[in-house]
Image (cartoon, coloured by chain):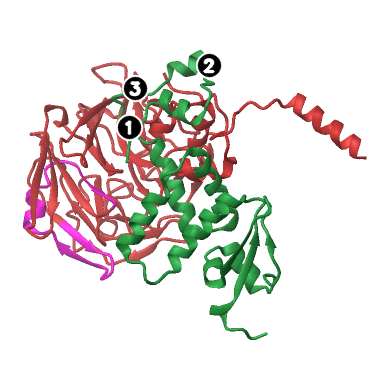
Chain colours: A red, B green
């Protein structure tokens, strides 16, 4: 019996020759893993195969990556006929500096989203998404018949690489305000197939994981906030939003999560809201002055914005996300993502080029997907 | 038996047959030993076939220092810094012992010490120090991270 086991073991060793060396020769791997998890993955990536494999394994603390909603560019410059644009989902892994497609969303029901239409020559129709609790959530878009494309949120979980649907909204909508605060997703205002004051005033919230329903919250006074697709920014237990993008005159509101009440936005805060805004860990709010390309940080004590840096490259910013000490901005008509280091004193800046033929619609910062196999297909 | 805890002695024997006697308060810094004491299995000498005498002496020294109420915060910091000034073999031995004996504070400090030896070094240097083979294929070698690449914190 003992001999048979010994033979089997030898056979196994021949059939599965050890492909990987131990992580730290001299230490059992489970202890070496504890040690390596204390080190930034950028230092582990280039040492050896087993270290590179480790940083992508499900048991290793996942590093942050970019998640980008992309539209394939319409081919013709004059669009008398709306050329079909399609929505794509990709992630940029900054450790390997490679783009990867996400697994496709469930085919049933198909996600059919209208991105361009002759009636909207100067811009694309919005697709609204938020990141919450490490997940990417699609909330609102326009379908080809000008109805809301999503009646339920579509959620992507990077660690499990799975898509799932959330519960149906009481009022599916588009051109709404969408944001997340303290692990809960909010949609406010907007319209269904057509404008209705009831939808324009309604506010719903949903906690990731709740499979049953959205909860109605205190509504808005009027339809001031149903003109544009708005990114509501979760910050210190509040949701902050303005009703016009870019540099134009606007109105602002702040929703207090605990009080379930809407208040006017403080003067200083709205005064500096002149482009996309995002909050880092819902603690520090950053705003980009669209015209000047100036990145600023909000100081709640003084109700004022403090300038961090200004760059030509940050002009024309469309949307941004903040996380892991970096602010990531979609600039230049959507074909570049600019990454700003807001931790280091010098404010370094990098440009991430998109895969050719695509434009960025939205950018999010989320944990990297796990890689179970090594030869991971990448997008050229 | 109702013996006062502060007087109880725990006897340990290392893999190379060295015996150590420590107060229970010192021994229970190890969660592993604490469980044995709580289960009443610590009355005879406890054999530790995974830990040699040299390493066990170091671990017990650490535990002793950490229950000594006369030691100040500064003294403890200095002690810990000096303690970790060891060669790789001893650091690895400590890691395995601290893991097996489940002495959390010691394990965390030694893990951090080894991690600090890796941080900031170039891949070739890391491989040399830790005796790691560069087993990348030529294609994978091409994918080495650029110096000026960015990442999230």
Is A259 inside the magenta-drawn segment? yes
3D distance between C-alphas at marks 2 and 3: 18 Å
Nearer the camera: disc 3 or disc 1: 3
Nearer the camera: disc 1 or disc 2: 2
Residue at the image point whose x is 81% and y is 27% from the top: A11
Residue A39 lies, with reference to residue B105, above or below; the image says above
Residue A113, quarter of the rendered image? top left
Q: Which residue is mark 2?
A: B137
Boundaries of the magenta span: A253-281
Residue at the image point whose x is 31% and y is 17% from the top: A75
Residue A136: tell me if it is visible: yes
Same subunit, tags 2 and 3 = yes
SS at circle 3: loop
Q: Earlier in the sequence, mark 2 or mark 3?
A: 2
Q: Which mark is residue B146?
A: 3
Q: Residue furthest bottom?
A: B2
- Crowd around label 1: few <14 · some 14–19 · many ≥20 (10 Å): many
Q: Which mark is residue A96?
A: none
Residue at the image point whose x is 25% and y is 51% from the top: A232
Q: Quadrant of the C terminus of chain B?
A: top left
Q: Chain of mark 3?
A: B
Same subunit, tags 3 and 1 = no
């Amino acid at each position: 019996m003992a001999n048979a086991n010994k033979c089997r073991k030898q056979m196994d060793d021949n059939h599965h020759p050890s492909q990987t060396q131990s992580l730290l020769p001299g230490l059992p791997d489970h202890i070496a893993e504890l040690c390596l998890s204390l080190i930034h993955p950028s230092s582990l990536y280039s040492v050896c195969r087993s270290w590179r494999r480790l940083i992508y394994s499900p048991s290793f603390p996942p590093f942050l990556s970019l998640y980008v909603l992309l539209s394939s560019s319409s081919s013709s410059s004059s669009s008398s006929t709306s050329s079909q644009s399609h929505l794509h989902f990709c992630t940029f892994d900054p450790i390997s500096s490679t783009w990867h497609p996400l697994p496709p969303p469930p085919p049933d029901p198909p996600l059919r989203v209208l991105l361009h239409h002759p009636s909207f020559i100067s811009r694309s129709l919005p697709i609204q998404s938020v990141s919450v609790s490490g997940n990417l959530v699609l909330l609102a878009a326009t379908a080809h018949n000008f109805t809301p494309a999503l009646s339920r949120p579509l959620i992507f979980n990077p660690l499990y690489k799975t898509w799932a649907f959330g519960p149906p909204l009481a009022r599916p909508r588009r051109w709404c305000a969408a944001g997340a605060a303290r692990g809960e997703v909010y949609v406010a205002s907007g319209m269904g197939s057509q404008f209705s004051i009831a939808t324009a005033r309604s506010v719903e919230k949903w906690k990731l994981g709740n499979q049953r329903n959205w909860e109605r919250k205190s509504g808005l006074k009027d339809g001031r906030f149903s003109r544009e697709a708005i990114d509501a920014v979760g910050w210190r237990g509040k949701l902050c939003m303005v009703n016009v993008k870019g540099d134009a005159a606007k109105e602002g509101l702040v929703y207090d999560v605990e009080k379930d009440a809407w208040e006017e936005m403080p003067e200083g805060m709205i005064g500096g809201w002149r482009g996309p805004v995002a909050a880092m860990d819902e603690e520090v709010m950053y705003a980009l002055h669209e015209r000047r390309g100036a990145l600023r940080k909000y100081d709640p004590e003084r109700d004022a914005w403090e300038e961090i840096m200004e760059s030509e490259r940050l002009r024309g910013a469309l949307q941004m996300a903040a996380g892991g000490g970096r602010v990531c901005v979609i600039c230049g008509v959507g074909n570049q993502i600019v990454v700003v280091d807001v931790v280091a004193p010098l404010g370094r800046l990098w440009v991430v080029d998109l895969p050719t033929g695509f434009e960025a619609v939205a950018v999010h910062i989320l944990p990297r997907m796990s890689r179970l196999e090594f030869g991971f297909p990448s997008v050229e | 038996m109702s013996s006062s805890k502060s007087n109880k002695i725990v006897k340990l024997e290392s893999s190379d047959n060295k015996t150590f006697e420590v107060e229970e308060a010192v021994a229970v810094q190890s969660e592993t030993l604490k469980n044995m004491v709580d289960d009443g299995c610590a009355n005879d000498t406890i054999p530790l076939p995974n830990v040699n005498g040299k390493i066990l002496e170091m671990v017990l020294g650490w535990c002793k220092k950490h229950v000594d109420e006369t030691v100040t915060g500064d003294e403890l910091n200095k002690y810990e810094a000096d303690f970790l000034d060891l060669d790789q073999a001893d650091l690895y031995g400590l890691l395995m012992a601290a893991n097996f004996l489940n002495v959390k504070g010691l394990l965390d400090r030694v893990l951090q010490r080894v991690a600090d030896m890796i941080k900031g070094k170039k891949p070739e240097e890391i491989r040399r120090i830790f005796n790691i083979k560069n087993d990348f294929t030529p294609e994978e070698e091409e994918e080495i991270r650029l110096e000026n690449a960015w990442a999230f914190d």
